[in-house]
RNA sequence: GCCCCGGUAGCUCAGCUGGAUAGAGCGUCCCCCUCCUAAGGGGAAGGUCGGAGGUUCGAAUCCUCUCCGGGGCACCA
């Protein structure tokens, strides 16, 4: 629709240029055309007359009039108006607008999908929590954002790989091991002998007990069985990592979030990729030795200071494996890579990108894309909740899912753009009422289902062919609003997927549900006039289809009854 | 000190990447079911878009400066 209108405008511009009214080169290749916010301004508007007025040395309104006169005739357009300082407003013909209903219902689950990605590979890395404790609410936000981004990308034709990267051997893991060991030896966090930076949560005790009891846990590609020996640090470490990885997996599963692969930092060492990356950086001349350490001259690529890659003690900083890991993403053919992290990691972006540039293997400067989410504050009864009984200092994802359910948890995490701090109101998320946006949306879906059931009970079964034939009857303002919204859905998906902004989808769905509820109140659907009835049923079925599609992308269920 | 992210209605936040009179939900006030789910809808009140300059025909949006809040500036992750 939009492209067709743009084509008409381009033709008009070309005609004016041919007539000498507009200097060559003054017209944009793609004339700006956007949806109007106000229905009084038609369906689409162009500011091209305003934009070209200066170059044409004519008044914007005068130029607009010439453009409208030069516009080829089209069955799509009911009328064209010039308004304000020189906007050209297009009003679509009613049947052209209503055709979206047929498109939605004919395409079914395919409506809203596109092939923008053309099968190219994109990697989405998210959560990537270290296996040192239960997932917290920040990880939940990451999981929801990453999962929906992945779904959006798949819906726009990308071949998506989802990965969870974790450190299974570093300082944090050593700390985990000594913490579990301390518990296995009967110490408590209050004890004077408790490790200085030990993890204090109750879950450490659970891990220790399971280890001593000889339980077996399965996580990722391995099965680990606990030993009774509280002195075997290596055995404790392996067991604790597996135990917590399994727990995180169960939390993610409860949240409906999955991954194609769990990538272990240790595998980078085992496969020689860390050493290979060091060698490559030496080869390109971007590293140097100083003070007994090996440095990356990341200042060559915009970082504000050089960074240590290999410490004086011979071990690597976290950042080198990070570069090696991202290198594998590139070498595995991902032309786009999205790394979803907490905003507290933003300091690492510049140096990882610098490291990738320093490899000099053709990675584009802005690769990978980063999506950083800000903090989550959990509120209950008007007060901030900070403590989880099991985890100690933070609220776990599991706490939230258990308390408010998966649908509300996911929806609330996706409502706000990642850049904004998120206040998670537990009381609101729990409410099964209109105040709760997720119920509001689900109710709209259930309401359409209910109308269809009613129709069946009254013997007024929906006749699709009759509905399609009567689409031109959909001329009420409420109906026009819905038609426009349905038409916008593919654009919303495209924009959300292309700019890494999943929050656009909940906002759109709310608008759609709102318009549907208003329509419901204003007009009866099950009217005696069969043609009109079927046209209206076709419309609300199309609304249901888009609601179901959008909710699915959010990972939220679309119930048939509430 | 430097870097990143926020600052929009009483509260929580949108604002389609520069357009027309700045929006929604909640909260407050008024109204709407003999009718497909009132788990809904309609309306009213509520704004110096943190502030000051600048660019532009046109700025919440872009630039500069500045104030407030959060985060980051490790041979931790």
Image (cartoon, coloured by chain):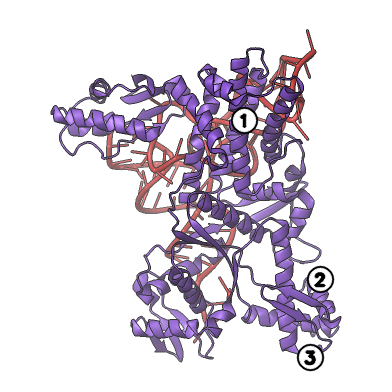
- Colour assigned to chain B in the rendering is red
Badge 2 density bin: few <14, some 14–19, many ≥20, Cα 10 Å: some
Q: Is residue A477 left or right of residue A42?
A: right
Question: Does A307 sit left or right of A227 as displayed?
Answer: left
Instruction: Check the image and report above or below for A377 versus A323.
Output: above
x and y percentages locating residue A309 in the rendered image: 47, 82
Left or right of residue A395: residue A33: left
Does the image show residue A57?
no
Give the spatial CA distance, label 2 vs label 3: 21 Å
Residue at position x 55%, y 22% in the image:
A479
Image quadrant occupied by the N terminus of chain A: top left
The disc label shown at residue A541, or none: 1
Q: Is residue A108 above or below residue A230?
A: above
Q: Does any portion of residue A492 appear in the rendered image?
A: yes
Answer with left or right where residue B27 lies relative to residue B53: right
Residue at the location (70% across, 47% down)?
A407
Q: Residue at x 39, y 33 (%)?
A: A2
* Residue at the limit of the structure toward the left, as seen here: A20
Question: Chain A's colour?
Answer: purple
Q: Earlier in the sequence, mark 2 or mark 3?
A: 2
Q: Which mark is residue A203?
A: none
Is A394 situated above or below A377?
A: below
For the residue pair B54 and B27, the one nearer the viewer reads as: B27
Front of the two marks 3 and 1: 1
Tell me the residue that label 3 is attached to.
A231
Q: Residues within 10 Å of mark 1 (few under 14, many from 20)?
A: many
Marked residue chain, label 1: A
The residue tagged 2 is A202
Nearer to us in this view, A406 or A378: A406
């Amino acid at each position: 629709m939009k492209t067709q209108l743009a084509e008409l405008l381009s033709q008009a511009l070309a005609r004016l240029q041919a007539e000498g009214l507009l200097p060559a080169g003054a017209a944009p290749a793609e004339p700006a055309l956007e949806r109007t916010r106000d229905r009084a301004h038609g369906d689409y508007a162009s500011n091209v007359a305003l934009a070209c007025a200066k170059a044409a040395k004519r008044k914007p309104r005068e130029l607009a009039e010439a453009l409208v006169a030069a516009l080829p005739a089209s069955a799509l357009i009911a009328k064209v108006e010039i308004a304000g300082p020189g906007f050209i407003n297009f009003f679509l013909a009613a049947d052209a607008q209503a055709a979206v209903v047929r498109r939605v219902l004919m395409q079914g689950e395919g409506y809203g999908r596109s092939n923008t990605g053309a099968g190219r590979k994109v990697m989405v890395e998210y959560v990537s929590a270290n296996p040192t404790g239960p997932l917290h609410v920040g990880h939940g936000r990451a999981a929801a954002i990453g999962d929906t981004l992945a779904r959006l990308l798949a819906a726009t034709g990308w071949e998506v790989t989802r990965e969870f990267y974790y450190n299974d051997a570093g300082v944090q893991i050593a700390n985990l091991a000594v913490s579990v060991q301390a518990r296995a030896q009967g110490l408590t966090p209050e004890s004077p002998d408790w490790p200085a930076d030990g993890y204090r949560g109750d879950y450490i005790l659970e891990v220790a007990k399971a280890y001593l009891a000889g339980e077996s846990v399965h996580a990722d590609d391995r099965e680990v069985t606990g030993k009774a020996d509280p002195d075997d640090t290596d055995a404790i470490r392996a067991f604790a990592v597996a135990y917590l990885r399994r727990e995180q997996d169960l939390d993610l599963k409860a949240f409906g979030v999955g991954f194609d692969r769990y990538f272990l930092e240790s595998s980078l060492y085992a496969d020689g990729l860390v050493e290979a990356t060091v060698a490559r950086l030496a080869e390109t001349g971007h590293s140097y030795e100083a003070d007994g350490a090996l440095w990356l001259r990341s200042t060559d690529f915009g970082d504000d200071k050089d960074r240590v890659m290999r410490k004086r003690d011979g071990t690597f900083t976290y950042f080198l494996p990070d570069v090696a890991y991202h290198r594998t993403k590139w070498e595995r053919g991902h032309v786009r890579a999205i790394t979803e992290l907490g905003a507290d990691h933003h300091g690492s972006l510049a140096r990882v990108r610098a490291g990738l540039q320093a490899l000099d293997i053709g990675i584009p400067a802005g690769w990978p894309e980063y999506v950083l989410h800000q903090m989550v504050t959990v509120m209950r009864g008007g007060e901030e909740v900070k403590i989880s009984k099991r985890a100690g200092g933070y609220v776990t994802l599991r706490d939230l899912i258990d308390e408010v359910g998966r649908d509300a948890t996911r929806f609330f995490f996706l409502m706000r753009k990642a850049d904004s701090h998120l206040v998670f109101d537990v009381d609101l998320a729990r409410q099964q009422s209109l105040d709760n946006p997720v119920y509001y949306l689900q109710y709209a879906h259930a309401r359409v289902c209910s109308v269809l059931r009613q129709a069946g009970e009254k013997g007024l079964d929906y006749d699709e062919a009759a509905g399609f034939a009567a689409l031109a009857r959909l001329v009420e303002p409420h109906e026009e609003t819905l038609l426009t919204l349905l038409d916008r859905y593919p654009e919303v998906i495209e924009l959300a997927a292309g700019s890494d902004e999943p929050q656009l989808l909940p906002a759109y769905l709310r608008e759609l549900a709102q318009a549907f509820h208003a329509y419901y109140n204003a007009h009866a659907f099950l009217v005696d006039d069969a043609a009109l009835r079927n046209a209206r049923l076709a419309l609300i079925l199309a609304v249901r289809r888009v609601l179901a599609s959008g909710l699915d992308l959010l990972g939220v269920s679309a119930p048939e009854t509430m």
